Amino acid sequence: MYATGRAADSRSTFATPQGSRPIQAASALRTQEIVQLIRLEAALDIRQRAAWGGMLLYVVSAVYVAHLAVKGDLGTATWNALYWIILLFAAFNALARSFQREDGGRQLYLYTLADPRSVILARTLYNSITMVLLSLLSLLCYTLFMGAHVLADADLFQFLLAVILGGIGLAAVLTLISAIAARAGSGLGLMAILGFPLVLPMLLAVMRASKLALDGVAWSVNSTYFLGLVLLDVITVTLAWLLFPYLWRD
Amino acid sequence: MRIIHLLGLLAPTLAYAQAAPTWLEDNLYGGGKMNAVVVVVAIIILGIGVWLWAQDRRLKRMEEKLKK
Amino acid sequence: MKHWWWKFLAIALLLVASVAALRTPLSPALVHVSPGRIAPGEVTIQVTGYNTRFRDDLGVHLINDGQHFCPERVDVLDATHLRATIIVPEGLRNAMTDLVVSNLRYPGAFFTEGLGAGIENGACDPEREMTGSVAAGFAFPNRSILYESIRNLHFHVPMWFTMIALMAISMWKSIEVLGSTSLDRDREAVSAVHVGLLFCALGLLTGMVWARATWGAFWTNDVKLNGAAVTALIYLAYLVLRGSVPDAHKRARLAAIYNIFAFVLLVMFLFVVPRLNAIDSLHPGSGGNSGFADLDLDNRLRIVFYPAVVGWVLLGAWMYQLRHRATRINEMQEA
């Protein structure tokens, strides 16, 4: 019953593409729907294992190029900066697929089935998990090639927290950007142009936080940065949640 | 005569000029840095002028289209 | 006619603020001493003032770690130059000696040699310093590395205020785009961004000139400058996004979504991240630099600064309306 009602609703929207279909402002979080959508994403990724392999290969090659280019020991600042730069490009590479991989038909199908807000929340969550995994794997690879000497007097808990919050932040910004770029019908190029200036605040804050963590500063010094990062993450996700339904409709 | 007089006027300036090695510094730092203000005001006026000129051209294109 | 009042207001405010910004004198200050180094024994120093009126009755002091000593002889050469012969005592405690001429003070005027445990007797009467003071009427503060360029406060900074105001207008129009199907709101949004980018360019260029004159480099790695660069990149990307979507309604919606998202993140970047990274900034009011607000004559800057900001913001709004109307006519013609 419910599903057919929604389908009819959306059909009328297709008849008048510009018609202002009221966005369900009061739509509650549909936890079950979100969980199912995340499962769907995971299933798709498992089916396309090559994509994950590609992402990992990308990170490994980037780290290896860095290893070849930089001979000798790196200072803490450079080590940190290089890690985040590699991760930034990996994030663009990984998250561009988020909305680009589906064709019109599948999107239409998803549209009739799920609330757009569930879709964006599910994608953001899934991409965050992807990014956190990717950052941890690249950290492993990075320390292997570039040496772990800078981690000697680091506060590892703080550093990992920075990596996780940074990964979530990058995922949150780039998921919406990926959706916009996909809607605009352009590829990775447009996504890079749109995304770079927007991830900069996140990137600068997280680089600073992880640098301080590597220096092993006290928790009280670094907590402002973590608070700022959490704030940025929350704001970004909220904005994506608010704006995505408008992107989804047409 | 006049040249010697002028040189006399310049003498203190020359003495200060040694502290300001380049042309740019001489011009930006000179006169209590008033020139920095002059350049800034000039940039703003020029910028708005260029903008007006661009709008003018847009309108002209539209007028020509209207004639056709 | 009744809708014109704010345009007159814009012109009036800009006129008054610009004239005041350019015509207000700088308060007097001591700007140069030579030589910059003193050692025990007789030294003749030359002092250069700026906007001062040196007269014969002024009191000249040197102060080292709270101990005063006075020159043997002071010759006032003209309103801005004086020469003084000092017998520098042995045993000054501090490596920096301040110079006081009447009510003007030049902290750290001289590197001091021959340090010791203090001088025997403060050689002169501290009361003498207040005579022959150099009065100033309405004047801007005279800061050591800024001097006259402090006037740029009234030209450079309003560019940024105007840009932010225009981008905020653009975001507001973008929200309206999402709430309606109007293409006109979209035209308003993009017109505001166009004019905002003009003010961004003006802010960057004027900032570069002022930075060169003050800090010695056109570009410094400063959070405010990074913010400006990121703003330019974001809105250029906005224009690129618009350029890559052919359908007008789809373009309006995509651009609006990006605009809202970008503006909120930009505000975070401009106003929150600098608070986090405060140590990095050369700009006043952050990173341990004193803001203009705590200058002794701050209200004299403000009384000119606020009208200038309002005037420029109104002018920006006017320019954006002109651009929007031209764009609308253009698109109606093409349709």
Image: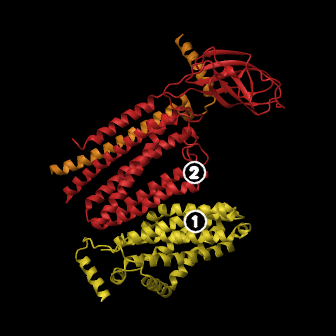
Chain colours: A yellow, B orange, C red
Left or right of residue A144, residue C143 in this image: left
Identify residue for label 2. Answer: C221
Asked whether the viewer can see residue A78, the reply is no
Q: Residue at x 61, y 51 (%)?
A: C279
Q: Residue at x 39, y 39 (%)?
A: B46
Marks 2 and 1, Cα distance to the nearest angstrom? 18 Å
Q: Quadrant of the C terminus of chain A?
A: bottom left
- Residue B54 lies, with reference to residue C114, above or below; the image says below
Q: Are marks 2 and 1 on the same chain?
A: no
Identify residue for label 1. Answer: A85
- Residue C150 lies, with reference to residue A35, above or below; the image says above
Q: At label 1, which amino acid type do we have?
A: Ile
x and y, in percent, of residue C266 in the image? 46, 58
- Residue C311 lies, with reference to residue A146, above or below; the image says above
Looking at the picture, tell me which residue is in the foreground, A127 or C285.
C285
Q: SS at mark 1?
A: helix
x and y, in percent, of residue A125 in the image? 49, 77
Q: SS at mark 2?
A: loop
Q: At label 2, which amino acid type do we have?
A: Asn
Q: Chain of mark 2?
A: C
Q: Residue furthest bottom?
A: A1
Identify the disc placed on residue A155: none
Foreground: disc 2 or disc 1: 2
x and y, in percent, of residue C50 in the image? 57, 25
Q: Toward which corner of the image does residue A238 lie, by quadrant?
A: bottom left
Q: Residue furthest left?
A: B68
Q: Residue at x 59, y 52 (%)?
A: C278
Q: Chain of mark 1?
A: A
